Each structure stands twice: as C-alpha cells, then as structure tokens.
Image (spheres, rainbow, N blue to C red):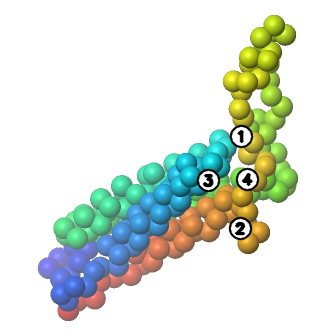
Amino acid sequence: MSNTSVMARPAAGAMSPAVTAALLAAGIAAAALAGAWYMQLVWGLQPCELCLKQRWAYYAIVPLGLVLALAARGGAPRALVLAGLGLVALAALGNAGLGVYHSGVEWGFWPGPTECTGPIGNLGSAGNLLERLDSVHVVRCDEVQFRFLGLSLAGYSVLISLLIAAIAAWGVTRKTRAA
C-alpha cells in the first residue's frame, strides 16, 4: 500500500488516529451545540452576540469532522485528511481565542463590541419611545447569565475548543500502525 493512504489496514475493529480524532472532534462540537441549544430553549438563557459567534466554529467542525472520518476510513490521501484536521484545529483555536475575548469582556478586562456592551442607541422620537423600548432586547455580552465552578459558558467554550484542537493535533501527529 502506498504511503499516501491514511490507513495501512489496521487490525479488525481498529480505527486510525485520523478517524478517531475526526469523530471525537465532531462529537464534542455536536455536544457543545446541543448543550448551548438546551440551555437556550429549556433553561431560557438567551445568547449574546459573542455567544452566537462562538457557535460558528462548532457548526463548521461537526460536518467537517464527519466528512474527514468518512474520507479517512475510505482511504483518502493522508495529506488531505491531515489538512482537514489542521483546519479543525485552526477553527477550534480561533474559537478558543474568541472565548478568551468574550470571557475578558465578562470580567471587565477590556471593552466588548458595541452591539452588546455599549449604550442603547437612537430609540426614535418620544412619541414611539415606549413601543421601541418594548421591541428592543439586547442580551449583553458583559453580563454573565450562568456560572458553574466559577466559569461562564464562554470560559467553558474556551476549554472545549482547546480540547477539540488538541484532539485534532493528536490525529495529525499519530500514524496508523500496520497490522
């Protein structure tokens, strides 16, 4: 078998590290999204602008991880699968950076985006002020809605994203052992 294949026919039931890493990354990202949606729909925690942006990486990692696992299992070129895992790691690291930024906004270390931390802008004329106030609902990025063990959900997103990045890096650095 050529060196460009992801798998060198592992023992029956064994998976290549690339397949394992891709499936773990997709599964963890899916669990993070499921948790976020559960907290939003069942607990009533409304996400702020930064919370919603932190979901983007998870939305990308789930299908990418599944496609990578199928490609690796199907014998796709190793370089292609490793590039895909590298993309998963970069998305997760970028998300971790966004989570650190969001956590810093929550702790007051630096200002956040004006969409969710600044003053409410022009509300129109005095005649329709009450109507406008009823229709404007800004979820603030600098106010924590939920903490567990001292960490906000943005902090947990950092940890989850770093875990996904580490798993993807593990999948890149490990090679399949021949049977």
Among all residues in the image, which is located at the extreme left? Answer: 1
The kind of secondary structure element at disc 4 is loop
- At 23% from the left and 78% from the top, the residue drawn is 7
Location of the C terminus by quadrant is bottom left
Horizontal arrangement in the rendering, residue 98 relative to residue 167 (left or right): right
- Determine which of the numbered discs, if any, sits on residue 139 in the image: 1
Density class for disc 4 (Cα within 10 Å; few <14, some 14-19, many ≥20) is some
Query: Residue 109's image quarter?
Result: bottom right
Q: Earlier in the sequence, mark 2 or mark 1?
A: 1
Q: Which residue is mark 4?
A: 145
In the rendered view, would you say 171 is above or below 62? below
- At 83% from the left and 31% from the top, the residue drawn is 119
- Determine which of the numbered discs, if any, sits on residue 148 in the image: 2
Horizontal arrangement in the rendering, residue 64 relative to residue 59 (left or right): left
Where does the image place residue 174, in percent across and percent down from the top left?
39, 81
Question: How far apart are the alpha carbons under marks 2 and 4?
Answer: 11 Å
Amino acid under disc 4: Gln
Among all residues in the image, which is located at the extreme front? Answer: 42
- Determine which of the numbered discs, if any, sits on residue 174 in the image: none
Residue 92 visible at all: no
Q: Nearer the viewer, residue 43 or 150?
A: 43
- At 37% from the left and 68% from the top, the residue drawn is 22
